[in-house]
Image (cartoon, grey):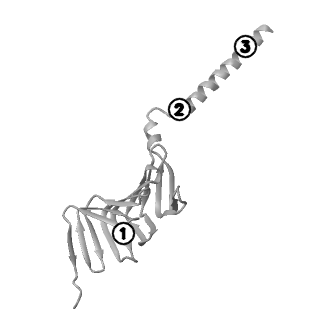
Amino acid sequence: MKRQGLLSATGILLLGLVVLMTLHEWDSSLPGEDQAVLTAPAILAHEINARAYSEETGELQYHLVADNLVQYDHNPLTEMTRPRLLMSNEQGQWTITSENGTVQQNGKLIVFTGQVETRNPQQKVELDTDELRFDSDTNIATSPGDAILRFESGETRAGSLEADLDKGVLSLDQGVESEFNAPAS
């Protein structure tokens, strides 16, 4: 009887040890899989429609629409295809579209790349560039590369620009050239 009890206790102990070892193996990634876990997307979404509001005033900062979205957990980065950003202020409604976009810094910075087009029909202003960065905290848009601004009466080319959308102030740098149509007399 003692021998049977000892065998049962040993069997239960071995079974418990096997269960603990199995659970320990399941708790961690397989060797070499660590990088795959870090680079795998956490969210894949289609036909995105998102809004961001000011923490201070509760007013709508921007409305973002995109065809596809990929968000990563281990890297605060969201990638979008064909994003469209709508913003309104005293100067009217601005629409920014591009081939690709990224949201960085927990939604505070949106970077548009690839045939970026910015339009304001009320002001009759158009901007074309290859990259445009929008900071939602400061409501400032910047383009580090060549930009073409079109107005009702002409066009301006610059190597870079910065636009404060709240104040309506535009700064142009690096080889600024403007052409305007003279009014007919």
For label 1, the residue is: 118
Q: Give the mark nearer the N terminus: 2 vs 1.
A: 2
Which of the 4 quarters of the picture holds residue 21? top right
Residue drawn 23% across the image and 69% down it: 157
Q: Distance of mark 2 from mark 3, alpha carbons?
A: 32 Å
Camera-near label (1 vs 3) is 1
Residue 12 makes an appearance in the image: yes
Which of the two residues, 170 or 102, is positioned nearer the viewer here? 170
Which quadrant of the figure contains the N terminus? Answer: top right
Which of the two residues, 185 or 60, is positioned nearer the viewer here? 185
* Vertical comparison of 114 with 28: above or below: below
Q: Secondary structure at mark 3?
A: helix
Q: Residue furthest top?
A: 2
Q: Which disc number belongs to residue 109?
A: none
Q: Which disc number belongs to residue 28?
A: 2
Mark 1 residue type = Thr
Mark 3 residue type = Leu
Give the class, few, some or many, for how many residues have Cα within 10 Å of label 3's Cα (few <14, many ≥20).
few
Q: Distance of mark 1 from mark 3, alpha carbons?
A: 79 Å
Tell me where residue 120 appears, x and y as whole percent.
39, 73
